[in-house]
Image (cartoon, coloured by chain):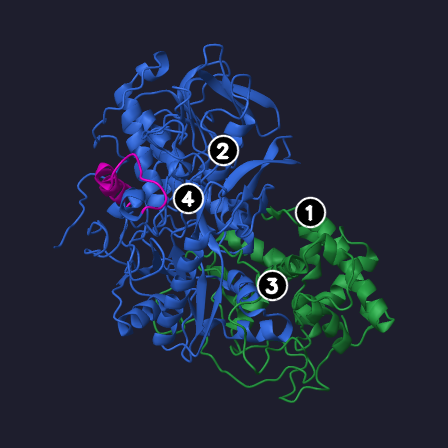
Chain colours: A green, B blue
Amino acid sequence: MSRKSFPSLATGDDLRDLSQPGYYAGYSTMAQKKGWDQATRNLVTERVDKIPPIRFFSPQEAKVLGAVIDRLIPQDDRSEARTIPILPAIDERLHKNSLNGFRYEDMPPDQEAYRLGLKAIDEMAQSRFGQSFVELAVHRQELILKSLHDGKPDPEHDAWKQMPVHRFWALLMEDCVTAYYSHPWAWDEIGYGGPAYPRGYMRLENGLPEPWEKDEQPYEWNAPADSLSEFEEAGIPPEHGSLHGHGGSH
Amino acid sequence: MPHQLGPMQTLPSPMRRFAENETVDYCIVGVGSAGGVLVQRLARAGFSVVALEAGPFWDTEKDWVSDEKGSHELYWNDLRITGGTHPLALGANNSGKGVGGGSVHWAAFAPRFHPSDFRVYSEDGVGVDWPISYWDLKPYYELLEREIPVAGPAWFPWGDPHGHPYGPHPLGGVGDVLVRGCTRLGIRSVAGGPVAILSASHGDRPHCIYRGFCLQGCKVGAKASTLITHVPDAITHGAEIRAHSMASRVSLGNDGRVDGVVYFDREGRERFQKSRAVIVSGYAIETPRLLLNSACPGHRHGLANSSGTLGKYLMAQAGNVIAGRFEELIRLYKAPPAHALSEEFYETDKNRNFARGFAIQTVGPLPVAFAKQMVAAMGAWGWGMRRVMMDYNHWATIGVLGEILPWEDNRVELAREKDQHGLPVAKVTFNLHENDKKLIEFGKKKVMDVMWAAGAKQVVQESRFAHLVGAARMGNDPSESVVDKFGRTHDISNLFVCDGSTLPTQGSANPGLTIQALAARTADYLIRQGDSIFASNRRDLAEPGIRHDLSPPYTRFKGNPRIA
């Protein structure tokens, strides 16, 4: 587990070590698993219980990616026992060469993209701050990552001449959110109903909870004051750069 | 354990198996929206048919899950290269693998094309006209709406107004936002369909339970896919569906006619299925890829490519997603993603600075898809991502479905990269042109207006594309198209293409219903032509007349209402 950026600079309530962040206290999708079909129950239970070993990344790459993931999807508010494993899920995908059905013509294969990108991030940390990425203070880690997010790598690095930085960013972010938001603890956090066969839903309109769901109990919270990954006050651009959606909504 | 196709239906057993050296009447490549309908019709009419499917034969209880990440295998995940100025996302975005093909994970919106869609060049001077009219296809729309069947309003006011055989679905939170926003702007909308999801039980299929997992394969069996609507009837009538069979080449005989399909079986062994005719139904990427990979002496640039148009005029629709955050809870994961729409902006409007138009439709991304949308639409990461996702239940999402015109430079070619069988993979190139860009800009703004009018406190949007059609288009002129109006290739008289790739233009309607209607029409033609397809090169373009006696069970006694 990496260092926590909470709570020293957080200005809201103390959000350290929550077993369940989010606005749906007491809601548990896993508590509903008796109502799920067998195939789904097996799959989701295994996702929680069995964390795959690291087989694709070298120990050094795994350390760097682990530190990167801690900033891309920070879990400093989650207790150790309730931290959602992201690195093992990405490693497993690359180890099994589980592709998403396409590769941009200006991108190398996913595995190469990761190796290239992680090496670049670590070398950018060295050349800008004289330390490896893993050893950098959280804020400095965010400075490096924010420059990739903005499509303006600082410092520049040859890797971004071999692959467009915004495509690498999208690859990384999509893999991270796929791991995090496919985990039932994240479903509890956001109040999502989870698997729903054969039971289904009966209250479709007006956002009303099913008998087994919970009402929302919202509260204010602040990310660490110096965090660069919080939305900016000035407002959010209507669209981020040249990214295109991959979600398959319709 | 029986092989389940939904909770109530099982795979007819035993399925006929043709012997290794047996020559069948038809070998069909691909069992998706079109292939499923074709194989069912041809088997019912008494032809011997083998349908090769690259993916698995799904058992919906064992293989499918109520889970986003766990549904990854439903999509065509093998490597493809994508490029151009506006590269298309493939895989989960638009292609299926396995019996049922993309119909397994379509959202199942089932609007018809409008009459104007078939005459785009005549009416607007852009694109190209179809070799058939809406009125040729209308009886097939009505028939397929009863077969799969389609639920929706009794009065659908756009295009050729019509009703739907099954009643509309109850409104979900997102549909409510669409109707509210449209109403406040004076835009007509409909809710509860048209969608190929059951609002009441149908034979051995239960009605919808509103769990929201349409794009992950409907375990309930309420959403139509050819896996459950047509394939079981095909097997009952003696067709063989051969899963895990990846076609590598359509084989050409010495007489200039095709004589079968070479394919790789599950163990990777190369095999040959002999047939009297071949129908390629691999959809807009795999169909041109297979024909290009089938190049041989006399057909150096691919089979059926004397026009040079094979692989060209590929189309995707603009699929921008507009997301709005509301004070109140929406819970967008409930109800089918597809359940309310407006086609008020579908037709060309002389007051706008572009030709053709777009539809406005509900979409319902589950958490992983929604988080990916927030990466693109908001640049969300870190704490920002965690924060916006904690508000997941406050967001509603509405899609633009916009017509992009057919352009020669939007195309499928062969790449240098090879797949696991050593076959060159497809390279897809996609560029937006001026009309497309203006249309997308207008459509995007209009849907953002709808979202604000519905009361959203924040509105963001993500650019994306939906569906794939074209790349082996139909036409009357053999120098400008790949197949004729029945799907027969201009070059080889016993080689057919039947799937979305034959569409000359695409309208702003989801293509699934049209693909199935065209497949039923092609089947009627083949059945009417009978053995002459196998024995002669004569091309008879006479209309076959629609057959109403070849539908799957439970179609009879249903009607298409029309309340004028």
Q: Is residue A78 left or right of residue B194?
A: right
Looking at the image, which is closer to me, B227 or B343? B343
As shown in the figure, which amino acid type bears the numbered disc 2? Pro
Where the C terminus of chain A falls, by quadrant? bottom left
Q: Find the residue positioned furthest to the left.
A: B564
Q: Secondary structure at mark 3?
A: helix
Q: Mark 4 = which residue?
A: B406
Residue B98 in view (yes/no):
no
Tell me residue B113's x, y (percent).
29, 47
Measure the C-alpha gap from mark 4 to mark 2: 16 Å
Name which of mark 4 and mark 2 comes first in the sequence: 2
Q: Mark 1 = which residue?
A: A109
Specify the subunit that label 4 lies on. Answer: B
Q: Is residue A55 left or right of residue B560?
A: right
Tell me residue B426's x, y (percent).
57, 38
- Label 2: how many Cα within 10 Å (few below 14, some 14–19, many 20+): many
Measure the C-alpha gap from mark 3 to mark 4: 35 Å
- Label 1: how many Cα within 10 Å (few below 14, some 14–19, many 20+): some
| Segment tinted magenta in the rendering | B125-149
Mark toward the viewer: 4 or 2: 4
